DNA sequence: CCCGTGACGACAT
DNA sequence: TATGTCGCCACGG
């Protein structure tokens, strides 16, 4: 597993995010064991367009549920993508963020069977 | 090789 | 609660 680069590890986790759910940079960083380098997660997503398979980077927001990276998607593409998945956005902020928050360190490790995507 | 930058986050004031 | 500062580490100039 350590054969993969840090960036690719980020992509793997992000691709695990169920549709209609979101997670934070810090949660991913913590799950990867690099809790302090949450900035690297954001950097990885910035260049995720050259990764394959595609990475749903729009499902990753900051700790406040704010769409800090929407500018990198161009206009309001990030917001539209999230709303198309049923996520409500207002003022660049995810509504009911706590409710749809998906923590890989918790929910994924439990391997909940009711999550089908 | 050194310096500034950055999709963040925790803590101090 | 809001604002400022520091730590984190990869990358480009």
Image (cartoon, coloured by chain):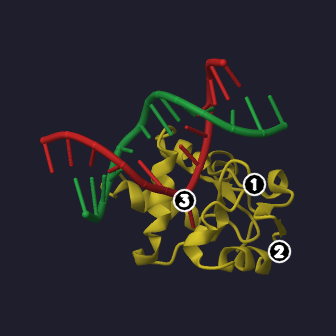
Chain colours: A yellow, B red, C green
Q: Where is residue A14 drawn, in percent x and y?
A: 57, 63
Label 3 neighbour load within 10 Å: few <14, some 14-19, many 20+: some
| Callout 3 touching callout 2 (CB < 8 Å) | no
Q: Where is residue A19 drawn, in percent x and y?
A: 72, 71
Q: Which tag, 3 or 2, sits closer to the chain's start? A: 3
What residue sits right under mark 3 in the picture?
A13
Asked whether, in this view, residue A116 is left or right of residue A8, the answer is right
Residue A27 seen: yes
Circle 3 marks a residue in which chain?
A
Q: Is residue A56 above or below residue A30?
A: below
Distance between mark 3 and mark 2 Cα atoms? 21 Å
Q: Where is residue C7 drawn, in percent x and y?
A: 44, 30
**Element under disc 1:** loop
At x 46%, y 70%, the residue is: A48
Residue A56 seen: no
What residue sits right under mark 1 in the picture?
A101
């Amino acid at each position: 597993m350590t054969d993969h680069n840090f960036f690719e590890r980020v992509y793997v986790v992000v691709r695990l995010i169920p549709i209609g759910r979101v997670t934070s940079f810090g949660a991913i960083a913590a799950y990867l064991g690099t809790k302090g380098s949450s900035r690297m997660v954001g950097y990885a997503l910035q260049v995720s367009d050259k990764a394959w398979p595609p990475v749903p980077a729009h499902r990753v927001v900051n700790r406040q549920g704010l769409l800090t990276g929407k500018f990198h998607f161009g206009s309001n593409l990030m917001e539209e993508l999230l709303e198309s998945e049923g996520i409500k956005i207002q003022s660049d902020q995810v509504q009911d963020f706590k409710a749809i928050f998906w923590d890989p360190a918790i929910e994924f490790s439990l391997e909940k069977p009711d999550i089908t995507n």
